[in-house]
Image (spheres, grey):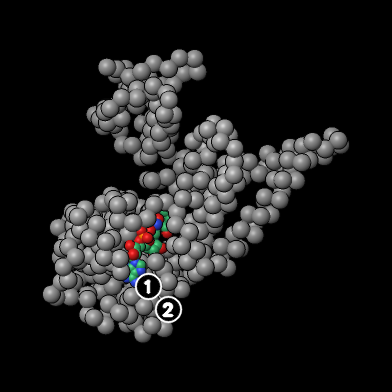
Amino acid sequence: MRSAAVIGTGLIGTSIALALTRRGVSVYLDDVNSAAARTAEAMGAGSCRAPEEPVDLAVLAVPPARIGTVLAGVQRAGLAHAYTDVASVKARPHSEMEAAGADPSSYIGGHPLAGAERSGPLAGRADLFEGRPWVLTPSVRTDRTVLNRALELVSLCAGVPVVMDTAAHDEAVALTSHAPHLVAALMAARLEHAAEPSLRISGQGLRDVTRIAGGSPGLWGEILEANSEAVADVLDAFAADLAGAVAALRGLRAPDPVRTEQAAAELDALLTRGNRGHARVAQKSGAADEVALVPVIIPDQPGALAELFAAVGAIGVNIEDVRIEHSLDQPRGLVELFVSRSSAAALSRLLSDAGWTAPSPDVLVAAPS
Ligand SMILES: NC(=O)c1ccc[n+]([C@@H]2O[C@H](COP(=O)([O-])OP(=O)(O)OC[C@H]3O[C@@H](n4cnc5c(N)ncnc54)[C@H](O)[C@@H]3O)[C@@H](O)[C@H]2O)c1
Ligand SMILES: O=C(O)C(=O)C[C@]1(C(=O)O)C=C[C@@H](O)C=C1
């Protein structure tokens, strides 16, 4: 691919444009909000100067309800040879683009499963899609060359292509993305009027559970509206479990010991099911049970994290994922490295030989100076 256009230079559009520009693709940037396009341009994501010839691929990174009309418009203008989008729902934009008179043969639906709770070009990152699934939803009318262009886009962004049909995609993301977003929002809404001292003693757990609740209500309202039935089905089942959890908690204080015991068993069953579901969430490269955790203490000083990563790299171990636990008022932080199970024990030993310290219950010793 030599040239591309990105329409909608917010978080996702700018991230795609940055990734393509770094791979040598010439990228045209456009946004209904010209300040957003100029900001992306200033970040090195491409140019706001309209191309003289049709580009190889145009990527529509606008909100889901705009896809149909924007696609019909850019096709009429002859902007590109092939078109794709990145909307978080697929069936509705697909039928809307047909209703808007767009040409289905030069279009393929797309959805990268990577993002953030922030919006706008300044949140864009060239590496956002690295190793992440990127769903493509070709229809029977999608031209094969268009599918190949989209595959090239995913590869240039270092994503992992997954081909699905629109209905299967929407049902899957109702469970794995859309319902989780609402659940996070509902939990975060509980905090709206929480007492300040309660919030001050919140830990990483609350941040993990509520991070995505920071997403734009406008965008998420559109996503949920377009996939409302499938999300409601997931939340019906969730509500039944929630009611069971509440009943079990109340049952724990019941005067009848038989009910107390039954309530404890119900709660245990729910928590155990939670463990099993958690274990099934795929890790970055492979199943959860192939990955083990190596905890390391680092001092709160510039370069400490980079030094740790360099040490792990020198040992020759690939970090699959990383979690950092750090309270602002603490002189050190806890880094949890997720590595392949087969290399975890050796990594722990070699890091310890090199002076890095695993957390122990009584004393936390800093890294080598
Ligand atoms: N946020 C995420 O985590 C995420 C992840 C994957 C996919 N998506 C999808 O990506 C798309 C963009 O989301 P985002 O998070 O980048 O939003 P964003 O708000 O950061 O960016 C959207 C941009 O589209 C522009 N825009 C709106 N209407 C337009 C139009 N008619 N013509 C040109 N530009 C227009 C806006 O001005 C804005 O700059 C959405 O379809 C969303 O479903 C989002
Ligand atoms: O990591 C996040 O912030 C996201 O929520 C990203 C996330 C998701 O994984 O659910 C959200 C919506 C998108 O359509 C794709 C990705």
Residue at x-position 41% and y-position 83%:
99
Q: Position of residue 331 (x, y in %)?
A: 39, 21
Mark 1 lies on residue: 67
Name the residue rendered at 74%, 37% in the picture.
Answer: 264
- The quadrant the N terminus occupies is bottom left
Residue closest to the eye, 192 or 247: 192
Q: Where is residue 164 in the image (x, y as percent from the top left)?
A: 41, 66
Say what amino acid the circle numbered 2 marks.
Glu
Characterize the local packing of mark 2: few (<14), some (14-19) or many (20 or more) Cα atoms within 10 angstroms: some
> In the rendered image, which quarter is residue 88 located in?
bottom left
Mark 2 secondary-structure assignment: helix
Q: Nearer the viewer, residue 199 or 173?
A: 199
Instruction: Give percent across and percent down for residue 277.
Output: 55, 47
- Does the residue tagged 1 have its C-beta within 8 Å of any atom of ligand 1? yes
Instruction: Decide if residue 329 is on the left or right side of residue 279.
Output: left
- Identity of the residue drawn at 54% across and 52% down: 185
Question: Relative to 140, does residue 45 appear above or below in the rendering?
Answer: above
**Secondary structure at numbered mark 1:** helix
Residue contact between numbered discs 2 and 1, judged by CB atoms under 8 Å: yes
